[in-house]
Image (cartoon, rainbow, N blue to C red):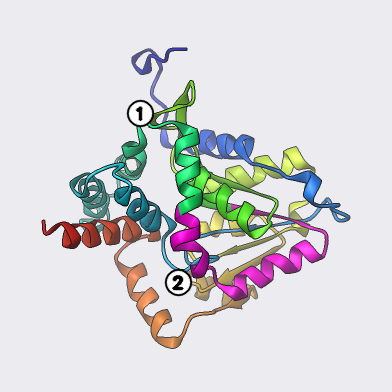
């Protein structure tokens, strides 16, 4: 099987967003056998970074892959600072921002899908499991106990999202889909990162496929970037919210849960002022790796 990128017409940002949402929905692992699902028309959708888990999953993934010599410290630093540059200098060209984000997964090119899936399971057990917010985990369990299905919806690679969902006993996961050919990653993405409007596209596509009534569904996130997804459902909820999302939730009477201490919440508010969670996670990974390498 071969792929000739030069022969394909370029996609605009909205087309890539829609493609990313469709790809994530089609890649969702739905473990129907594990749930009787007495309430099949309702479901809950959870963001991961800072909503279900403390910090950015991409940071922990990058650190774990670096330890396993998937890439060098300079590789991740280059990708992270490219992303940070677009955010800090205020460049608003969405195609450039999307390109910078997509570069964060280029380092897996040439690796096998099954290899990465095994490594992700190890990294979750080593570095992510103890970072799950107990309060958010309890919210997810509440929906499961009601017989509702629970999906993760995240910009993180779908392999990470699936692992977290499986480890927590959730229904399945939607995440950024990295392109593969014959079981080997090409270094490109299917569409774009599952972020912002792409998350809403993914949820909408999944709801249509699974026969969900979105008015009876719930969605949880910490970020105002997820307002498109939160606005789709009848029961949106802000968890550990940034300042903009907290204000929006209060204006609209949405539920708000904050599991951080006051100091952590203040630091999170400062972080929102300088960039998105994905960029900060990648930048933090770059800084940590540079310090360890002495570069």
The residue positioned 50% from the left and 72% from the top of the image is 241
> Which secondary structure class fits the magenta region best?
helix
Query: Residue 83 versus residue 115: which sits nearer the camera?
Result: 115
Given this view, does label 1 or label 2 mark the residue nearer the observer? 1
Q: Measuring from the top left, give residue 47's x and y in whole percent.
A: 55, 59
The quadrant of the rendering that contains the C terminus is bottom left
- Magenta residues span 123-152
Secondary element under disc 1, as helix, strand or loop, is loop
Give above or below for 268 relative to 26: below
| Residue 138 drawn above or below residue 214 | below
Per the image, is 263 magenta? no
Dot 2 falls on a residue whose secondary structure is loop
Which residue is disc 2 drawn over?
242
Q: CA distance from mark 1 to mark 2?
A: 37 Å
* Percent of width and height locating residue 38: 88, 55
Give residue 180's position: percent from left, percent from top: 46, 27
Queried whether the magenta region covers residue 127, the answer comes back as yes
The residue to which callout 1 is attached is 110
**The furthest residue to the left:** 295
Please say whether residue 156 is visible from this viewpoint: no
Residue beneath the point at 44% across and 43% down = 193
Q: Is residue 295 left or right of residue 120?
A: left
- Looking at the image, which is closer to me, 283 or 122? 122
Whether residue 33 is visible to the viewer of this picture, yes or no, is: yes
CA neighbours of label 2 inside 10 A, class few (<14), some (14 to 19), many (20+): many
- The crowd level at tag 1 (other Cα within 10 Å; few <14, some 14-19, many 20+) is some
């Amino acid at each position: 099987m071969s792929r000739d990128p030069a022969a394909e017409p370029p996609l605009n940002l909205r087309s890539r967003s829609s493609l990313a949402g469709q790809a994530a929905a089609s890649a969702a692992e739905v473990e129907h056998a594990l749930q009787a699902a007495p309430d099949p028309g309702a479901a809950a959708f959870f963001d991961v970074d800072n909503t279900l888990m403390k910090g950015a999953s991409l940071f922990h993934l990058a650190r774990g892959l670096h330890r396993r010599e998937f890439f060098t410290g300079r590789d991740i630093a280059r990708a992270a600072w490219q992303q940070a540059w677009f955010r800090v200098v205020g460049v608003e060209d969405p195609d450039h921002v999307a390109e910078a984000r997509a570069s964060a997964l280029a380092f897996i090119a040439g690796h096998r899908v099954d290899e990465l899936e095994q490594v992700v399971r190890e990294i979750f057990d080593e570095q992510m499991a103890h970072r799950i917010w107990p309060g958010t985990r309890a919210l997810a369990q509440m929906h499961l106990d009601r017989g509702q299905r629970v999906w993760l919806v995240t910009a993180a690679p779908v392999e990470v999202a699936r692992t977290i969902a499986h480890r927590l006993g959730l229904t399945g996961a939607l995440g950024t889909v990295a392109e593969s050919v014959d079981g080997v990653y090409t270094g490109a993405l299917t569409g774009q990162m599952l972020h912002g409007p792409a998350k809403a596209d993914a949820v909408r596509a999944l709801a249509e496929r699974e026969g969900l009534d979105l008015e009876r569904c719930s969605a949880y996130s910490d970020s105002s970037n997820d307002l498109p997804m939160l606005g789709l459902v009848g029961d949106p909820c802000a968890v550990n919210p940034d300042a903009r999302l907290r204000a929006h939730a209060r204006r609209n009477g949405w539920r708000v849960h904050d599991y951080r201490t006051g100091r952590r919440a203040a630091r999170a508010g400062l972080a929102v002022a300088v960039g998105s969670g994905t960029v900060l996670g990648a930048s933090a990974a770059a800084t940590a790796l540079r310090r360890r390498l002495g570069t």
